[in-house]
Amino acid sequence: MIAERTRRLRRVVALAAAGLVMASCGGGGSPPPTNELRFNTDDFAIRVSPETKPTRALEPIYWRVRVHDVKSGLPIQGGEGRIFGTNRDRKTVSNGLAATEELGTYRSNLMFVTAGMWAMAIQFRLDSTKVLQKTPDWTQDIMAAEEPGDFSPPASSRPPEPPPRATDSTRKVP
């Protein structure tokens, strides 16, 4: 009976310790963005989200891309990639990914020429000796650009006249 109580006590202590370890693992970082998209390729787990909200045409839209190894879960640092999009009119925008100080995090920006739905994707690789791996396409709704600023006429309606030339004032009129 004492041996059974000892086993139960050990089991309770082990479960409590495991619970503490699990609780300490998940709460360290900031929560993921609410509009983060998650994709897997053969070797990478890729999470992408727009940092610029709302996403509007004719404005630079910054993207945050986080890349981890799909098997180990470790962040991938020093990789190469690009983000790109195409609309129904076959207009295409693309830009490379630049590494940030945060491990496994890259940043890029795109400027969409028109509003509407754009088919988007990301290509990524460890280095130039590896093959680019592409995420599945997703659609991104780009809203119309904001109205431009004030177009009222300038305060002065005509530029000042140039001063008269010296040759004109010395000439005699017949």
Image (cartoon, grey):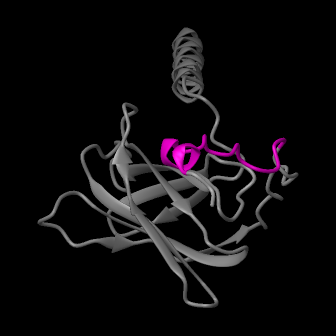
- The answer to which quarter of the image holds residue 22 is top right
Q: Is residue 73 left or right of residue 63?
A: left
Residue 126 counted in the magenta span: no
The image shows a total of numbered marks equal to 0
The furthest residue to the top:
2
User: Where 132 falls versus 72 (above or below)?
Assistant: below
Q: Is residue 136 left or right of residue 79?
A: right
Q: Quadrant of the C terminus?
A: bottom right
55 vs 100, nearest the viewer: 55
The furthest residue to the left:
129
- The answer to which quarter of the image holds residue 96 is bottom left
- Residue 34, position in %: x, y? 72, 47
Query: Magenta region's main secondary structure?
Result: loop
Residue 163 counted in the magenta span: yes
- Residue 158, position in %: x, y? 77, 50
Q: Which residues are magenta?
A: 155-171
- Residue 59, position in %: x, y? 64, 56
129 vs 92, nearest the viewer: 92
User: Where 4 falls versus 171 (above or below)?
Assistant: above
Residue placed at 28% from the left, 71% from the top? 132
Residue placed at 56% from the left, 62% from the top? 111
The furthest residue to the right:
152
Residue placed at 63% from the left, 53% from the top? 36
The furthest residue to the front:
174
93 vs 13, nearest the viewer: 93
93 vs 174, nearest the viewer: 174
User: Where 127 falls versus 165 (above or below)?
Assistant: below
- Residue 1, position in %: x, y? 59, 13
